[in-house]
């Protein structure tokens, strides 16, 4: 994985891509995201799925003021002429009903996927990534719900774990991320995710892909395909940005865990 650059002061970009915010869940780093969006502006803001955690909210309502602040920050950006694109993911799949009835959210455009022409001249597929997840198909979707419950439990354990680390003067360390990565590898849950993405893009004529879904920020070449994952705002607090000169970069915001 490439080096992730920490965010500093006020910066502006051509495009910013963020995903897996999971508003409505206790794991969401909403305060950190609000600071990031205040410090970093852009002409195009892409919300690449799982912005709102509909799965979690169906089980238990959780919506603090900080989560409303994120929505307000995004709406304010849209009013100030930032082009906001909302790409639907699996946790916010309920929004597809709005698409069917032609309901819009002001100046925010909602879609399942998006074809993005980068300043580097390349054509990128922008998708949350769940379209490549075989477990999301038909009657096997219950397995994803089971995995989601386990992941939420790990996030809860992670909060308690880091509370005691802080008391001992130790820095934040993501126990849930450590366990999640190894569990998913052990179960081969998303072991071939990147290869499937690259294969699809090659068949469809895309030069690369911009996605989220697996909570692992990365920029790398897979054969001829440029694979870019913007990470998440639960553990890593990362975003993918496109500079005005066409360069791509991953930014990491130091969250206040």
Image (tube, helix red, strand yellow):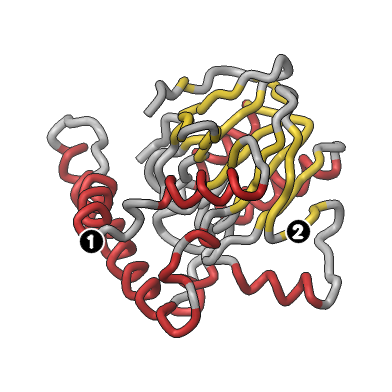
Q: Which residue is mark 2?
A: 110
Above or below residue 38? Residue 137 is: below
Q: Residue 74's x, y, as percent?
A: 71, 46
Q: Residue 77's x, y, as percent?
A: 77, 40
Q: Secondary structure at mark 2?
A: strand
Residue at the spot x=51%, y=48% of the render?
199
Residue at the spot x=27%, y=56% of the render?
184
Q: Residue 231's x, y, as percent?
A: 47, 41
Q: Closer to the camera, 92 or 30?
A: 92
Q: Which mark is residue 187?
A: 1
Above or below residue 161? Residue 165 is: above
Question: In this orientation, does residue 172 appear?
Answer: yes
Question: In this orientation, does residue 47 appear?
Answer: no
Q: Secondary structure at mark 1?
A: loop
Q: Closer to the camera, 186 or 21?
A: 186
In this rendering, position of residue 148 left or right of residue 248 = left
Q: How far apart are the alpha carbons under marks 1 and 2? A: 33 Å
């Amino acid at each position: 994985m490439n080096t992730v650059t920490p965010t500093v002061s006020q910066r502006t970009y051509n495009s910013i891509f963020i995903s897996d915010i999971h508003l409505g869940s206790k794991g969401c780093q909403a305060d950190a995201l609000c600071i990031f969006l205040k410090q970093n502006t852009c002409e195009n803001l892409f919300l690449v799925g799982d912005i709102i955690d509909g799965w979690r909210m169906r089980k238990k309502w959780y919506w603090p003021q900080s989560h409303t602040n994120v929505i307000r920050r995004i709406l304010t950006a849209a009013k100030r002429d930032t082009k906001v694109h909302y790409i639907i993911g699996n946790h916010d799949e309920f929004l597809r009903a709005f698409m069917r009835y032609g309901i819009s959210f002001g100046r925010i455009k909602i879609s399942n996927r998006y074809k993005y022409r980068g300043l580097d001249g390349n054509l990128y597929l922008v998708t949350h990534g769940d379209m490549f997840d075989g477990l999301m198909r038909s009657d096997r979707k219950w397995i994803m719900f089971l995995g989601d419950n386990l992941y939420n439990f790990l996030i809860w354990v992670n909060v308690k774990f880091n509370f005691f680390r802080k008391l001992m003067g130790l820095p934040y360390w993501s126990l849930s991320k450590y366990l999640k990565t190894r569990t998913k590898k052990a179960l081969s849950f998303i072991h071939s995710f990147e290869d499937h993405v690259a294969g699809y893009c090659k068949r469809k004529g895309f030069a690369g892909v911009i996605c989220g879904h697996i909570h692992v920020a990365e920029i790398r070449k897979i054969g001829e395909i440029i694979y870019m994952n913007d990470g998440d705002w639960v553990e890593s607090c990362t975003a993918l940005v496109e500079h005005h000169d066409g360069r791509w970069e991953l930014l990491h915001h130091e969250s206040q865990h």
